Image: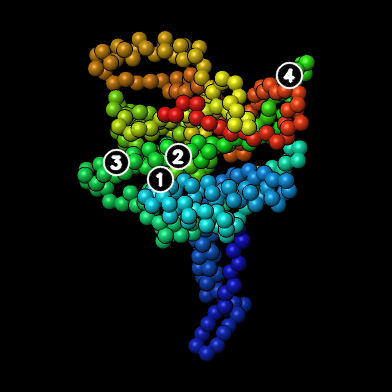
Amino acid sequence: MIILIIYIYFLPGFVYPACIITGQARFREMKRILILSLAVICLAAANAQAVVITGSGTTKEEAIHNGLRDAVEMYTGTLVYGVTDVENYTFQKDQIVASSLGYVKHYRIIRTSRVDDLIHVVMDVTLSEDKIDRILRDNVDLMTIEDVLKDYNNVTQRQDQMKKLMEMLKILADRPLSEKYSIIYTGYEIKRIMPDKVNVEIHAKIYANPFFMRANREILRHLSDPTGDSPDVWRIGTNYRIEYGKLKNDNHFITKQAEFSDELKVYVTINDEKVGDKFYRLRDNLFVVWDSVAFTKAFVRLFPKTFWEKYNDKETKFDKKWDNYAIRKSKIIPEDGLPMKFKYTIDSEQVKDLRDLKLKLEYYEKN
């Protein structure tokens, strides 16, 4: 970010260059300008939220254009939770995406790679989110999180707010899987050649839509019960990360009245055909790996103490070392994608089509 400041000093009838202001007056003026400059920089930084996006294409320019277009489409798609006029919203969204470059503040290329005839470009992208919001507000009946959060000083207002947030949460949950997660084919490796079949290892990357995650977390944060854990709420985890070698996350305590599940079961398709019987668990930015042995160990250690505390109406306290213990082998989905490999068996004639495989995620079990 570069901010150029040009200043001159005015007195009645004259213009004086800064260089003739001397002594203490000049020092005070320069100090004032420095403070104002820092304020402008801080304000600009506060409004700029960059996300990492991967674009693909046959040329570098095409990959960049596709990545920027996808970024605009992903962000605009997350605003659908507040839309009542869906038809007009779709039209406005298509208009915005069609001129997507006009809504990109700036981008920075992080990494460029080539897989066969396809170029992948990983970029840091900052969008003009306020500009997109303003266009939709002017043309569509749009309800945003900020609208819902106005005035909740009494119980009635808070309850109304919770109902609206729960409705927004349900709408987000019902959105297509492709608006939440995506998978990109990055290559293959032939593992075994048989008389009539070929075993192939498919390489891919799975991505979590950063705009969707941000909107979902914001709703959960404001819907969360400030009193914490209780029998009437679900504990929902978001923003998973590794701290001091352990899996940590943010917790939100969501009423059980909300129709919401924090975990999705998905499977992979290649050219619209399901690959095997295996499914994967996705939870916010986490690729969940369930360890049944670890779960059994934690249950054996915690159940007697928890049962005794509940039986005697005492407050239940858990040692934090058991947090996420059963999913401790899970993997964080980074902004530039989580590499995946899986087996795929094809006919000999299909080998020539391996470069053109189309991968997709589908719901294994819609919650």
Determine whether label 2 and label 1 are within 8 Å by CB: yes
Label annotation for residue 81: 1
Say few, some or many: other residues with alpha carbon within 10 Å of mark 3 (under 14 / 14 to 19 / 20 or more): some
Determine whether label 2 and label 4 are within 8 Å by CB: no
Look at the image and tell me in which quarter the C terminus lies: top left
Discs 1/4, front: 4
Label annotation for residue 197: 4
Say few, some or many: other residues with alpha carbon within 10 Å of mark 4 (under 14 / 14 to 19 / 20 or more): some
List x then y, in percent, for residue 10: 53, 82
Residue 80 against residue 360 in the figure, above or below? below
Q: Name the residue nearer the viewer: 262 or 221.
A: 262
Name the N-terminal-most of marks 1 and 3.
Answer: 1
Could you tell me how far apart the alpha carbons at marks 1 and 3 are, in whole angstroms? 14 Å
Label annotation for residue 307: none
Label annotation for residue 175: 2
Give the residue displayed 58% in from the left and 47% down from the top: 70
Which residue type carries mark 4?
Answer: Lys
Name the N-terminal-most of marks 2 and 1.
Answer: 1
Discs 2/4, front: 4
Residue at the disc numbered 3: 163
Determine whether label 4 and label 3 are within 8 Å by CB: no
Q: How does the figure colour the protein chain or chains? A: rainbow
Look at the image and tell me in which quarter the N terminus lies: bottom right
Q: Secondary structure at mark 3?
A: helix
The image quarter containing residue 20 is: bottom right
